[in-house]
Amino acid sequence: MNEGRAPGKAVYIDARSVRVVLDGDAWRIRGLDKADQLVPLRRVDRAVVRNVDEGLMRALLALVEREGTVHFQDGRGTTFAVLQDTRPTSPRWVREWVSMIEEQSGCAPFHWWADVQQRHVWSRVFRRGRPGDYAANRALIVGYIQHYRPDVLVSHEVSELEQLLRAWLQADLNRQGLRPVVEVLRHKECDLVGVLHRCMMLTLLWKYACWRRQKTVAAALPCRDITAFFELQAVAGLRDQLERHISVLHEECRARGKRGHGEGGRLHARK
């Protein structure tokens, strides 16, 4: 199903410590007391930047022209702006899906999908039935981490993870050409990104809880360690989960459309 651009790498840049300039179809990254590093733009999927200067902005615009995504952070690491191509290329199946959603009078497929996906994630994480309350389930896992790290303000680490996931999700939906689907659902007051973020965050948070418990360092972790953990999960696990969620929603919309013409049966949740 995925006919978008092949996934690339994420690059984190702080213009106070490195200088990035455009060199043909690549970025030349010049660090302090380090040899220049040449990064081909075709290998970059998204950039997360701080302290942008003029040279870096030109380099970032070249990435956006290739349908990459740029997230701007302030000094505290909070994302405050996003830069994306205003004319993303969407594969044919996405364009057909958008038309399908526009033709449907209500949002029944989306609401059914959201309920099933969230409850399925809750049951997978906790290995037993729990109410589909994201806030309560999130608090339960955060409390579990806090129990083993009582001297650490765990909420700050979790907030960092949430920002990383939100930025990645935004960029990957853009890479796959799915922004038109997000927008057409938003017009129907359906928050696709919000549901995806809740489902994926709970899975990610549980993995983080297990990983965090094994860390021998009891003190608060630096952002680079949390980022390294996240990028490791993004390589396969998160992308596979996103693909499953999107595939089920797409198939449910198709099934509802067929039933509208007297065809089709109930679509079961994908495990």
Image (cartoon, grey):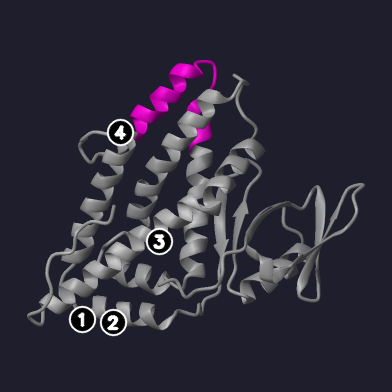
Of labels 4 and 3, earlier in sequence is: 4
Q: Name the residue rendered at 36%, 59% in the picture.
A: 244
Of labels 2 and 4, earlier in sequence is: 2
Q: Name the residue rendered at 39%, 74% in the picture.
A: 180
Q: CA distance from mark 3 to mark 2?
A: 20 Å
Residue 24 against residue 136 in the figure, above or below: below
Dot 3 and dot 2 residues touching (CB under 8 Å) = no
Label 2 crowd bin: few (<14), some (14–19), many (20+), radius 10 Å:
few
Front of the two marks 3 and 2: 3
Q: CA distance from mark 1 to mark 3?
A: 24 Å
Q: CA distance from mark 2 to mark 4?
A: 38 Å
Q: Which residue is mark 2?
A: 99
Of labels 1 and 3, earlier in sequence is: 1
Q: CA distance from mark 1 to mark 4?
A: 38 Å
State yes or no: residue 155 in magenta. yes
Residue 208 in the image: state x and y as whole percent. 49, 35
Q: Which residue is mark 3?
A: 243
Q: Which residue is mark 4?
A: 126
Front of the two marks 1 and 4: 4
Stretch of the chain drawn in magenta: 138-158
Residue 103 badge: 1
Dot 2 and dot 1 residues touching (CB under 8 Å) = yes
Q: What amino acid does circle 1 point to?
A: Glu
Residue 230 against residue 219 in the figure, above or below: below
Dot 1 and dot 3 residues touching (CB under 8 Å) = no
Residue 169 in the image: state x and y as whole percent. 47, 57
Q: Main secondary structure of the magenta part?
A: helix
Q: What amino acid does circle 3 point to?
A: Glu
Q: What amino acid does circle 4 point to?
A: Phe
Side (left or right) of 56 relative to 30: left
